[in-house]
Amino acid sequence: MPEKNIIKTPDMGTVEAVDFVNKFSDSLTKLREALGITRPQPMRQGNTIQTYKFTVTDPTDGQGKAIDPASIGEGEDIPLTHVSREKDQEFTVGFKKWRKAVTMEEIQRVGYDMAVTTTDKKVLNKIQKSVRTDFFNYLATAPTDLGEVSGLQEAFGKSWGKLGSIFDDENIGTIVFINPEDAGDYLGNAVIENGQSVGFGMTLLKGFTNVTVMINNSVPKGTFYATVNDNINLQYIDVHGEASKVFQNKQVISDELGLIGLVKDDNTTNLTNQSTIFAGIALFAEMTDGVLKGTIKQGGTASK
């Protein structure tokens, strides 16, 4: 009978797996905080996300012509302007899946840490990039185009002003997403180096404008996206749910919220160490018309 509390297989493997999912969760938490997302929402039945848009309808006369507010005479009833919140885009979030296997021979050749742990980290980076890329692809479909601006300072100002008009609030928290090269052209390398990493390959810049600036290579150079922090949501499929029953004879290792699932398996049929990972995560804007995009004039400059 082995000595009590002796460390044996798969104790160390489980610790590594827990560390893997916690690193993912911690990184996403930092990103959520930077984006102003207070709480991620688990997906309900069907995994469907519904986005919305505002429609403002001006009053018209009997012939369908818009009424000029300046034409309303003294003592006359002021016609009503109608505002409605309507459904816009609907999309479904499904699981994304990854699997990695390392042979016994490769573990023997380079060591367990290099063959298994280091490659797990590479897969983690790949998963983070997948979530980030989906988010920026979503922002690229922004229905509100600000057109071309002379430089980043104009981009910040126009974004803040337009979003204040859309959400009817001048105290909104504006977030602008830009490419690192555009940030470098505007700020200089010294400031970029002082940026704060918030995970998922994004860097947060603050203190030089009245907006929050996020930089990432997924934003095309010369393009910017903008929205408000209250408009960004994170929804996910809880890996602790029904899907986990697929692994009745395996332990699904996950973070507390169930953002990501990891199953470790030592396959004796082909003598490999395998990691199977699955997650269903969506970053999106609830009000689609509250997402802006624009382009920066090539060679344009902005005063600091």
Image: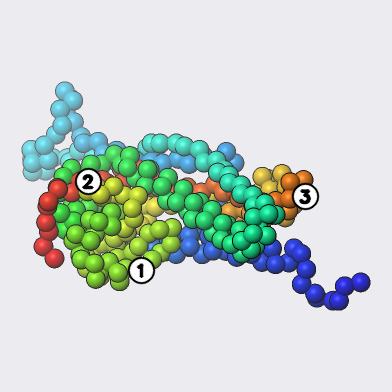
Image quadrant occupied by the C terminus: bottom left
Give how far across and how far down residue 52 sits, in percent.
38, 41
Q: Are marks 2 and 3 in contact (CB under 8 Å)?
A: no
Quarter-of-image position of residue 188: bottom left
Give how far across and how far down residue 121 sits, in percent.
54, 59
Instruction: Please identify, in this view, whether the residue under mark 3 or under mark 1 is nearer the observer.
Output: 3
**On the rendered structure, is 60 left or right of 83?**
left
Kindly identify which residue carries mark 1.
Answer: 196
Farthest right residue in view: 1
> Which of the two labelled residues, at mark 1 and mark 2, occupies the earlier sequence position?
1
Instruction: Please identify, in this view, whether the residue under mark 2 or under mark 3 is nearer the observer.
Output: 3
Viewer-closest of 302 and 290:
302
Give how far across and how far down residue 78 sits, in percent.
17, 41
Kindly identify which residue carries mark 3.
Answer: 268
Residue at 86% in and 76% down: 3
Instruction: State the SS at label 3.
Output: loop
Q: Amino acid at mark 1?
A: Gln
